[in-house]
């Protein structure tokens, strides 16, 4: 087990050694929003989300990770932190985001998950207004917000995914994982999600395995859903990942110069630059889209 002072030293090393290559994030004065989801659990989604967020944070940007993976939320565990609040405190108990969030490392903050997201659809007008006001404040205070979604796509998570500026689906080369990813994308298509979906193939033995996995998934999606995907990239299978999880030190902090960390940095930059291009022509903000779900819910009820 790595000692706390060693871990802190590594965190400082990351901050000093990373070259800032990102352009300013706040082009529109609004945080860039990225929802990361998967068709099933166990594909490394939360780990990828956290390490991509760390990559952007190491470039001097303020990054917030909101854990919406209820039942399997583990962002705080991966960071070796303990949280006393969760997103449920904001949704139901009208606790401010500022009070509910925990500082991870450097410019990274996070809000833990918790059971009861279904209460989003039973919030009264005052609770919903408070949540939207708090969310809008976070959009101004942060450069980038990651939503770590649960496996699959429940109706309770749907508003966040459909409102995000970028949606990423994580899969692995396993056939069952590919089909689960297809099911998740199909769910998006059913709800008229028109944006392109970014695909990350995790735990690849070779780069070609990643591109081949994407080709299979894209072929099925094109044939049956008539939608196009975007290949964000392949992440190599690396024994450093389970070791980092066991030590509760993210691999981007522990091994910032490894091939794995360089790949993560490239993926994060790709998503970031895509968000910049989208922001220049985006007419409806994240808050606008999220608000529309509450208005529709009130009409339907």
Image (spheres, rainbow, N blue to C red):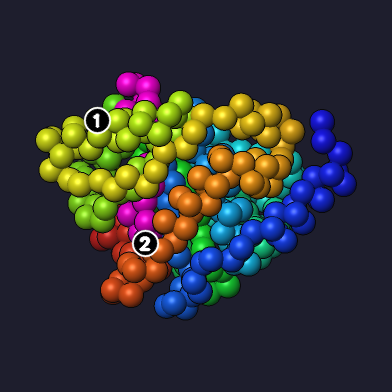
Q: Does the magenta stretch include residue 100?
A: no
Q: Is residue 167 left or right of residue 5?
A: left
- Magenta residues (range): 162-178
Q: Which of 145 and 72 is in front in this view?
A: 145
Residue nearest the viewer, comparing 117 with 141? 141
Gap in Å between the C-alphas at discs 2 and 1? 24 Å
Q: How many marks?
A: 2
Q: Helix, strand or loop at disc 2?
A: helix
Q: In this view, does 260 lie above or below 29?
A: above
Q: What residue sits right under mark 2 in the picture? A: 274
Instruction: List the residue tagged with mark 1.
Output: 216
The picture places residue 243, in percent across and down from the top left corner, at 68, 29
Number of residues whose C-alpha sits closer than 10 Å to that of mark 1, classed few (under 14), some (14–19) or many (20 or more): some
- For the question of whether residue 47 can be seen, the reply is yes
Q: Give me the residue at 80% from left, 45% from top.
A: 7
Eyeballing the image, is 75 above or below 27?
above
* In-image side of 296 versus 220 (left or right): right
Quarter placement of the N terminus: top right
The x and y percentages for residue 249 are 71, 40
Q: Do the residues bearing badges 2 and 1 touch, measured as CB atoms within 8 Å?
A: no
Query: Is 182 left or right of 16, judged from the image as shown?
Result: left
Residue 128 locus on image (x, y percent): 46, 63
Which residue does the image show at 59% across and 66% down from the upper left?
Answer: 20
Mark 2 is surrounded, within 10 Å at the Cα level, by few (under 14), some (14 to 19) or many (20 or more) other residues, namely some
Q: What residue is at 45 percent from the left and 65 percent from the top?
A: 32
């Amino acid at each position: 087990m790595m000692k706390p002072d060693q871990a802190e030293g590594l965190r400082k090393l990351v901050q000093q050694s990373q070259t800032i290559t990102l352009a300013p994030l706040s082009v529109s004065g609004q945080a860039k929003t990225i929802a990361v989801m998967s068709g099933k659990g166990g594909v490394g989604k939360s780990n990828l989300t956290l390490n991509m967020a760390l990559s952007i944070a190491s470039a001097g940007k303020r990054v917030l990770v909101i854990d919406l993976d209820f039942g399997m939320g583990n962002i705080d565990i991966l960071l070796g932190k303990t949280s006393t609040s969760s997103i449920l405190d904001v949704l139901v108990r009208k606790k401010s985001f500022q009070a509910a969030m925990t500082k991870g490392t450097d410019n990274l903050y996070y809000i833990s998950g918790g059971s009861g997201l279904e209460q989003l659809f039973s919030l009264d007008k005052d609770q919903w207004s408070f949540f939207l006001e708090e969310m809008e404040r976070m959009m101004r205070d942060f450069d980038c917000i990651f939503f770590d979604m649960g496996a699959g796509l429940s109706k309770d998570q749907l508003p966040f995914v459909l409102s995000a500026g970028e949606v990423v689906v994580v899969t692995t080369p396993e056939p069952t994982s590919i089909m689960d990813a297809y099911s998740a994308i199909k769910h998006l298509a059913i709800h008229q999600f028109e944006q392109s979906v970014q695909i990350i193939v995790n735990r690849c033995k070779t780069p070609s395995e990643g591109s081949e996995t994407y080709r299979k998934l894209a072929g099925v999606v094109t044939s049956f859903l008539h939608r196009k995907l975007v290949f964000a990239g392949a992440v190599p299978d690396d024994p450093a990942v389970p070791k980092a999880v066991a030590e509760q030190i993210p691999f981007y902090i522990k091994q910032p110069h490894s091939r794995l960390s360089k790949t993560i940095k490239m993926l994060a930059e790709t998503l970031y630059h895509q968000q910049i291009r989208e922001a220049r022509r985006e007419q409806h903000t994240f808050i606008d889209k999220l608000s529309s779900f509450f208005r529709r819910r009130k009409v339907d009820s």
